[in-house]
Structures are given as C-alpha cells and as structure tokens.
Image (cartoon, grey):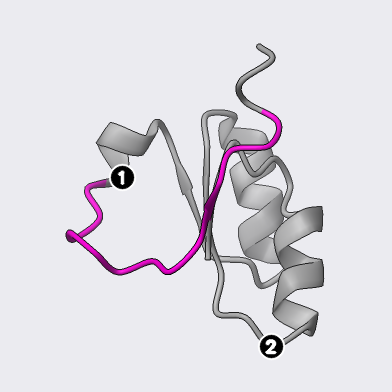
Amino acid sequence: MLDVGSGSGAFLRRMKQLGMIVQGVEVSRAAAEKANANGIPTVAGTLTQAHFAPGPFDVITINHALEH
C-alpha cells in the first residue's frame, strides 16, 4: 500500500498492524522523518520525486492531499 500525503504515518501504521506492506510519500520532511523513525518507510518529497518502479503497489491512497 502506498499513501500519498502520508503525514507522520498514523494511517499506514494501522494498515501495517493489519498485515499490509506499507510505504508513504510526504512533502513535509519533518513528518516523513517522524514516520520513518516509527518504522513506516516514507519518502520525503513529491510522488514524482519518489521514483517508484512501475506497478509495485496493489493499493494507493491519497486521503489527505486532495483537499489541499
């Protein structure tokens, strides 16, 4: 699962507890560092800056980015 705009990783932490393999992308460097410190792999930057290989995710969420 990839969460774009993942903040400090609270949603992904819950998904990980449910058994998913998770990854986040967050523009806030401080939030991304907090997520990484809590065991949630998170790229600091934009989705295009993350350079993910094509097709690695079964689920992508963008819950807290569209309203901004």
Q: Position of residue 24 (x, y in %)?
A: 54, 53
Magenta segment, prevailing SS (helix, strand or loop): loop
Q: Position of residue 4 (x, y in %)?
A: 53, 41
Q: Position of residue 38 (x, y in %)?
A: 74, 67
**Mark 2: which amino acid?**
Gly
Image quadrant occupied by the C terminus: top right
Q: Which mark is residue 50?
A: 1
Could you tell whether 57 is left or right of 17 in the image?
left
- List the residue tagged with mark 2: 19
Q: Residue at x 70, y 40 (%)?
A: 7
Verify whether residue 54 appears in magenta.
Answer: yes
Q: Residue at x 70, y 77 (%)?
A: 16
**Mark 1: which amino acid?**
Ala
Image vertical order of residue 54 relative to residue 25, above or below: below
Q: Residue at x 62, y 49 (%)?
A: 33
SS for tag 2?
Answer: loop
Image vertical order of residue 53 relative to residue 19, above or below: above
Q: CA distance from mark 1 to mark 2?
A: 23 Å
- Quarter holding residue 57: bottom left
